[in-house]
Every structure is written in C-alpha cells, then in structure tokens.
Amino acid sequence: MPGAKITALGCYVPPRVLTNRELEKMVDTSNEWILQRVGIRERHIAPPEMATSDMAVLAACAALSQRGISGRDIEAILLCTVTPDMMFPSTACLVQDRIGAKGAWGFDLVAACSGFIYGLTTAAQLVKSGAHKKVLVIGSDTMSRIIDYTDRATCILFGDGAGAMLVERGDPGEGFVDFLNEIDGSGGDALKMPAGGSRMPASAETVAKRLHYVKQEGQAVFKYAVRKMHEVSRDLLDRNGLTARDIKLLIPHQANLRIINAAAEKLGLSADQVVVNIDRYGNTTAATIPLATRDAIETGKLKQGDLVMFVAVGAGFTVGANLWRWAY
Ligand code: UT7
C-alpha cells in the first residue's frame, strides 16, 4: 500500500485585524478578560466582499505554487467549512472551478473545528487506497459572518482565515501514520447555529431572534474539549506504542489557550512541543490547524522527518486526532 504524505501548505488570512481594544468598544468586555480566559489578542476579519471560497482559493493557490503544480493536477478537493458561500452548490465546486482543477471531484466536509483533521484523514485514505495521487484539503471559515457582535461570550473568540494542504502519494510507510476520530451528537445543542437549515428555515422571525448566529454553552464545550483533546491524543499514541516524548509537536485546534494547556499538561508534553498561535488569529474553526502548522514551519519547529500530532474537538461534538511524519 502506498503512503500518503503532505507535500505543500498554503494559508490566507485577510489583512484587517480586530483587536481586543476594539471589542471593548463593541461589547462589555476587556482586553484583560479575553487574554486571561482565552489567550486571544487579535483576530483577522474578512472584508464584506470576501467569502469562504475566496479565502479558500487564495490558500489553495499558495499551496499549488509552493509545489510548482497547477489546479489541473488535483484529483479531489475536500473543502472543510461551516461557513460555505451558500447552502449549495458546495464551496468545493466553486473552488474547483476557480483553481482550474478540471476533472477533479470533491465535496464540503462539515465537522466544524475538527474539519481539517477529518479532511486530512479522508485524503490519506483516498491516496493510500491507490485511488488518487493528489488530493487538496482546504479549511476555510468566515466565522465573522455567523458571529453575533452583540454577544460578548462568542464574539471575542472567532476570526477568519483559510489553509490548504496537498496530500500526495508517497512510498509505503511514508507520511500518514494513523488517525482516531469520533463524533458524539449528544452534545449537539452545546454549540450550533440554530436557523437557516431545514429544521428552522430563514424567516423574519428567525432573523429578529438572531438565530442565524453561533450559540454556545461555553462551559459545557470547555469541559468536553479539555477531556476529549487529552483522551483522543493519549489513545492514538497508546495504540501506536508511542508516548508524549516520541512526538516532536502537538498542533492542536486553537479554541482557548486554557484548553490547549490543560490537554498538553495531561499528556505530559513540554511547552516547546505545543504549537500556539491563538493570540494572533483567534479561533478560525477549520483553518486553525493549517495556520498553526505554517507557524511551526516558519519558526523552524517543524522539520522533515518530525512526528507531528494534530488534534481537535468541535461542534457536533466532533473529535479527531492524526499522526503524520512530516515529509518536507
Ligand atoms: O472551537 C469550538 C469549540 N469552542 C470552544 O472550545 C470554546 C469553549 N469554551 C470556552 O472557551 C470558554 O467557556 C469561554 C471562553 C467561552 C468562556 O470562558 P469561561 O471561563 O467558561 O467563562 P464563563 O462562561 O463561565 O463566564 C464567566 C463570567 C460570566 O459572568 P458571571 O455570570 O460570572 O457574572 C460571563 O458572563 O464571564 C462573563 N463573560 C465575560 N466577561 C467579560 C463571558 N464572556 C465575557 C467577555 N468579557 N467576553
């Protein structure tokens, strides 16, 4: 069986920065509270004319140009998002057309903050099975479009951004090592956007009640995230006969610095084994993993041959962890 390796990474964040100080003027919050409770200093916000597919295309093109290939070389596009341009057609279709991935197939993958990990998992299977040689995984979310900027408990958390990784056929045993993913729908009410689907279609009433925005029971999600980030990471290491010392880096979903620190401590990881950039981007949902990976590469923390673990917990609930040997 061939291996599946990540061979390129491209990211995009819109230039406009929304600081904690600005949020202080919008809702009853403070820079100190946000830093202490969540660890965010600023986040990037897309301009009104920019949608999820636009950021996805920019991230995808950056990955393609890094690898020196064109859209025509891509066989499948997995577009991970909870903020598609529209209900249908899929954002994957919009991106396929714009990057010229003629003949490719693909779909939108809805797994919220675990989206990118589910995308990587799926791409690895498509490549390892021999079905495809080049699959593009894109995480892109314009969270600012579904955030209620009158709700201080959620509006401070999220930012916009996109990241893309190219998963390619490798030699047997190269790249992808293992995954452990799990969904738990019993937690679905804790984090959701209630209206706009078939259960509660858009109406004047749903708009008036602000039901097209993210609603979160913060404490419930926090507790679940701390427990599951640790459990899924530990179980994935265990079943591969590994311990925390064997991995070079943990690249976790960036939702709250306290969640990351608690999970890392329980796993017995040292601070230099954990990638954190939530201070600059906030929670960009499906884009946090590629954005954090880019930082790890640019700061020289992640190098060819390193064993890296990605982990996330998100709305659904969705839980996922991947082990990869970094290939470039
Ligand atoms: O990526 C998707 C998954 N999402 C997550 O992982 C998020 C998980 N949850 C969290 O990160 C945290 O629960 C939050 C950051 C959302 C909230 O932090 P918390 O420490 O759990 O605060 P809390 O909800 O228990 O609220 C404590 C207090 C409350 O005031 P009272 O009732 O004690 O007077 C809140 O009203 O903090 C208040 N509060 C705020 N105060 C200032 C909530 N938001 C804010 C705010 N500024 N922005």
Image (cartoon, rainbow, N blue to C red):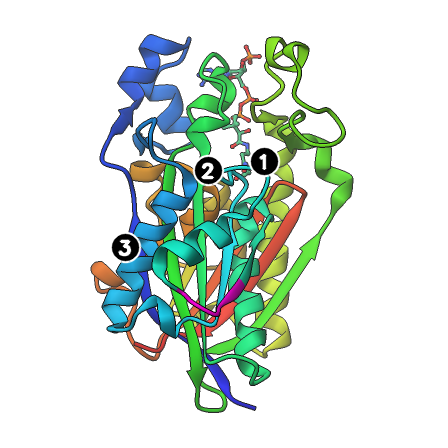
Q: Which residue occupies the foreground of this view, 120 or 65?
A: 65
Horizontal placement of 68 versus 289: left or right?
left
Which residue is labeled 3 in the image? Answer: 295
Which amino acid, by three-letter code, is at mark 2? Asn
Q: Nearer the viewer, mark 3 or mark 1?
A: 3
Which amino acid, by three-letter code, is at mark 1? Phe
Residue 111 badge: none
The answer to whether 195 is drawn above or below residue 63 in the figure is: above
Q: Is residue 103 magenta?
A: yes
The answer to whether 304 is drawn above or below residue 78 in the figure is: below
Q: Along the polypeptide, which appears first: circle 3 or circle 1? A: 1
Could you tell me which residue is drawn at 45 percent across and 33 percent down? Answer: 143
Question: Principal SS element in the magenta part?
Answer: loop
Which residue is labeled 2 in the image? Answer: 256
Q: Secondary structure at mark 2?
A: loop
Could you tell me which residue is drawn at 57 percent across and 59 percent down? Answer: 118
Q: Is residue 233 magenta?
A: no
Could you tell me which residue is drawn at 49 percent across and 68 percent down? Answer: 104
Q: Nearer the viewer, mark 3 or mark 2?
A: 3
Q: Position of residue 274 (x, y in %)?
A: 38, 56
Proximity of marks 3 and 2: CB atoms separated by less than 8 Å: no
Q: Secondary structure at mark 3?
A: helix
Q: Which residue occupies the foreground of this view, 160 or 241?
A: 160
Which residue is labeled 1 in the image? Answer: 222
Bin the neighbour count of mark 2 within 10 Å (Cα to Cα): few under 14, some 14-19, many 20 and up: many
User: In the image, which residues are magenta?
Assistant: 101-105
